[in-house]
Amino acid sequence: MCLAVPAKVLSINGHEAEVDFDGVRRCVSVVLTPDVRVGDYVVVHTGFAISVLDQEEAQQTLKLLDELEAFSANEIR
């Protein structure tokens, strides 16, 4: 299963951006999102920012992922 996850753009250098996934920083390609700006949220899939999200939508998605993780952790126990 593949999952695309929201991340906040911290910096941009050419076609690469440093993004933050809830405290984990990674470099991703922004070649598919040429209008992205520092501070934007992007959906990242396989190392590529594939779309730009507004902050509210990104926060809602991140909250749902946190809830899913908490539910999954409780189910395993």
Image (tube, rainbow, N blue to C red):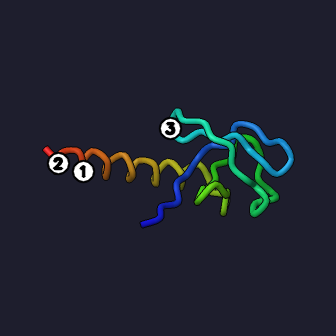
The first of marks 3 and 2 along the sequence is 3
Query: Which mark identifies residue 76?
Result: 2
Horizontal side, residue 65 vs residue 73: left or right: right
Asked which secondary structure carries label 1, the reply is helix
The residue most toward the left is 77
Depth check: give the residue in front, 76 or 66. 76
Asked which secondary structure carries label 2, the reply is helix
Q: Position of residue 2 (x, y in %)?
A: 47, 65
Considering the image in quadrants, where does the C terminus appear?
top left
Q: In this figure, which residue is indicated by the disc labeled 3?
A: 22
The residue under the point 69% across, 49% down is 28
The residue under the point 40% across, 47% down is 63
Horizontal side, residue 56 vs residue 61: left or right: right
Label 2–label 1 contact, CB within 8 A: yes
Depth check: give the residue in front, 5 or 53. 5
Q: Which picture quadrant has residue 38?
A: top right
The residue most toward the bottom is 1
Spatial CA distance of label 3 from label 1 is: 18 Å
Considering the image in quadrants, where does the N terminus appear?
bottom left
The residue under the point 60% across, 56% down is 44
Q: In this figure, which residue is indicated by the disc labeled 1?
A: 72
Which amino acid, mark 2? Answer: Ile
Which amino acid, mark 3? Answer: Asp
Asked which secondary structure carries label 3, the reply is loop
Q: Position of residue 12 (x, y in %)?
A: 79, 42
Spatial CA distance of label 2 from label 1 is: 6 Å
Which amino acid, mark 1? Answer: Ser
The first of marks 3 and 1 along the sequence is 3
Q: Marks 2 and 1: which is nearer the front?
A: 2
